Amino acid sequence: MLKNHLRQDLQWLKRQARKDRRITLAVLGGLLAAWARQLSDVQGGNPSPVLLALSAALVLVSGAAWLVSAFFVSRSLRVRREPTEELRWVARIGLGKEWAFCSLSAYVAWHLLQFLTALVMS
């Protein structure tokens, strides 16, 4: 009875992890496209050194979080054989999703900083 219940719980965790992996990959792909578009549209101008430093820091934080998330997702592509390996697989996907949303948060903060800068400067 208990073994059957544990097997069902593990199956549910695996289904949830597959959903989380799809969400993570969509967030990572969307962020990559958004950063590419934003950085190609950056206008020269003459920003203050503080704003330039904040922008650079946010870009670096977002990029680092993106790389960490991609690392965890890539580690989840391996075949799992034992239940403990499957639990580690679920945990890696969860960590990857968390880091993807950290990267997204840094992107949103950078975008908000650009918006406020444009609002104040005009």
Image (spheres, helix red, strand yellow):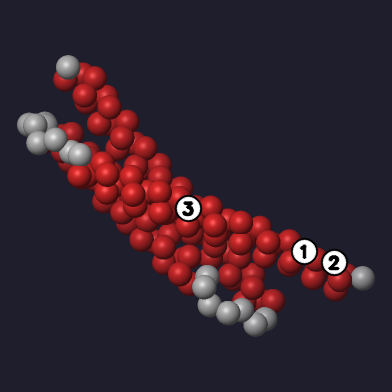
Q: Position of residue 90 (x, y in %)?
A: 61, 65
Tag of residue 89: none
Q: Quadrant of residue 80?
A: bottom right
| Front tag of 3 and 1 | 3
Residue shown at the point (66%, 58%) measured from the top left: 16
On the picture, is 116 further left or further right than 26?
Answer: left
Task: Work out whether residue 79 or residue 26 is closer to the camera in this orientation and state it.
Answer: 26
Q: Amino acid at mark 3?
A: Ala
Q: Amino acid at mark 2?
A: His
> What residue did someone put label 1 on?
9
Task: Work out whether residue 62 or residue 26 is closer to the camera in this orientation and state it.
Answer: 26
Tag of residue 26: 3
Mark 1 secondary-structure assignment: helix
Q: Position of residue 77 (x, y in %)?
A: 52, 73
> What residue did someone put label 2 on?
5
Mark 2 secondary-structure assignment: helix
Q: Quadrant of residue 18?
A: bottom right
| Front tag of 2 and 3 | 3
Residue shown at the point (34%, 49%) measured from the top left: 33
Q: Residues within 10 Å of mark 2 (few under 14, many from 20)?
A: few
Mark 3 secondary-structure assignment: helix
- Mark 2–mark 3 contact, CB under 8 Å? no
Q: Is residue 57 above or below residue 50?
A: below
Q: Quadrant of the C terminus?
A: top left
Q: Is residue 115 above or below residue 107?
A: above
